[in-house]
Amino acid sequence: MSRSIDLAVIPGDGIGQEVVAQGLKVLSAVLPQDVKLETRKYDLGARRWHATGETLPDAELESLKGHDAILLGAIGDPSVPSGVLERGLLLKLRFAFDHFINLRPSKLFPNTASPLAGRPDIDFVVVREGTEGPYVGNGGSLRTGTPAEVATEVSLNTAYGVERVVRDAYERAQARPRKKLTLVHKNNVLVHAGHLWKRIFDAVGQEYPEVTTDYLHVDAATIFFVTQPERFDVIVTDNLFGDILTDLAAAVTGGIGLAASGNINPTGEFPSMFEPVHGSAPDIAGQGKADPTATVLSVALLLRHLGYAEEAARIEEAVAADLAERDGTPRTTDAIGDALAARVSG
Ligand SMILES: NC(=O)C1=CN([C@@H]2O[C@H](COP(=O)(O)OP(=O)(O)OC[C@H]3O[C@@H](n4cnc5c(N)ncnc54)[C@H](O)[C@@H]3O)[C@@H](O)[C@H]2O)C=CC1
Ligand SMILES: CC(C)CC(=O)C(=O)O
Ligand SMILES: [Mg+2]
């Protein structure tokens, strides 16, 4: 039986364009001959906004729905007012396609420039809620631009939304050897949202007696990300805390250029979207300096999501082997992509 992948590609802005090219290179190299890969590129991001004023028109949103998955580079550019593309394109996609699981694995690969190099194996996954929290746009400002301005950004937390992400995190913890799940929030201060999360976390936990649980306030969690990251297995947390913690996780496990993510709609109703954790990095864009490894590892998550576990593992092995040989000599984005493509095909 012939197989096929119908992939939407949104390179986006800045280094997004550069790293997605490498992700596609490795994807083409790893797929067996009998898998037909079809890609359609969507011109969305700063260039499009400047040309037409559009961020994500309905027709394109509708068309994106029809693909098996989406590969995204990064969104955001200094030439566009902050938030226009991040909210109007990136978050619009995550919300419209109900990407309530924002999956961000963190692993300390050997030989990476980590402040934790030489420590026991660090291998944890952050399950970040992706459709609620303070990112929903539930706010506004009064007397904008005056000394009397008042601004709000109210975090939205529904029992439905919290339960589904917590349940997913328990399932993931149950399936891993250590079977440990940590809830991270700030329920000593955010007593409304925080207690909702804790109550649901405890109630759902009754159904998973094999999973060991603990709770950390987010400020304390940042300490342990640096001093004792091996204590973590699966972490579940809200949209904002998860965003911040996963940049920190990337920094302590080898760098932001290695951190992959998946915006997952587990029901399959909508396509899931895979992207590096990092942004468009305007400070290095166009210079061939961006590390495409995060995007390549996001392609591995994409393949595993679509049922290509063997190919996903080949990519992860290729990345581990490539990292093991790095000696600090700078390599271009293209050179890293070429090396990974060669490893997965040979
Ligand atoms: N998912 C997305 O599309 C995201 C978009 N953004 C947007 O990206 C823009 C820039 O945001 P920043 O806060 O600067 O975060 P950023 O992640 O783009 O960059 C932070 C730092 O990490 C470095 N970096 C990032 N990716 C790298 C890579 N692959 N290889 C080597 N170095 C890398 C950058 O050079 C920079 O010094 C903003 O418009 C922001 O809103 C930020 C985060 C995620
Ligand atoms: C730009 C934000 C909306 C996204 C972000 O920083 C992230 O998902 O890590
Ligand atoms: Mg982020």
Image (spheres, rainbow, N blue to C red):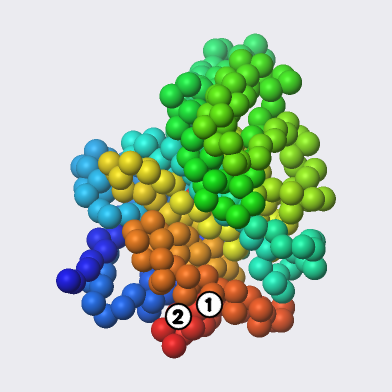
Residue 228 drawn above or below residue 340:
above
Q: Nearer the viewer, residue 140 or 327?
A: 327
Task: Give the residue drawn at x 72%, y 62%.
Answer: 121
Task: Give the residue drawn at x 77%, y 62%.
Answer: 120
- Dot 2 alpha-carbon crowd within 10 angstroms: few under 14, some 14 to 19, many 20 or more: many
Q: Position of residue 243 (x, y in %)?
A: 59, 42
Identified by mark 2, the residue type is Val
**Residue 83 visible somewhere in the drawing:** no
**Residue 300 visible somewhere in the drawing:** yes
Identify the residue at the far left of this view: 1
Q: Position of residue 275 (x, y in %)?
A: 46, 55
Task: Give the residue drawn at x 44%, y 47%.
Answer: 263
- Dot 1 alpha-carbon crowd within 10 angstroms: few under 14, some 14 to 19, many 20 or more: many
Image position of 273 (left or right of 63): right
**On residue 318, which mark appears?**
1
Task: Give the residue drawn at x 70%, y 72%.
Answer: 110
Q: Secondary structure at mark 1?
A: helix
Identified by mark 1, the residue type is Ala
Q: Are marks 1 and 2 in contact (CB under 8 Å)?
A: yes
Quadrant where the N terminus is found in the figure: bottom left
Q: Nearer the viewer, residue 70 or 110?
A: 110
Identify the residue at the far right of this view: 227
**On residue 344, which mark appears?**
2
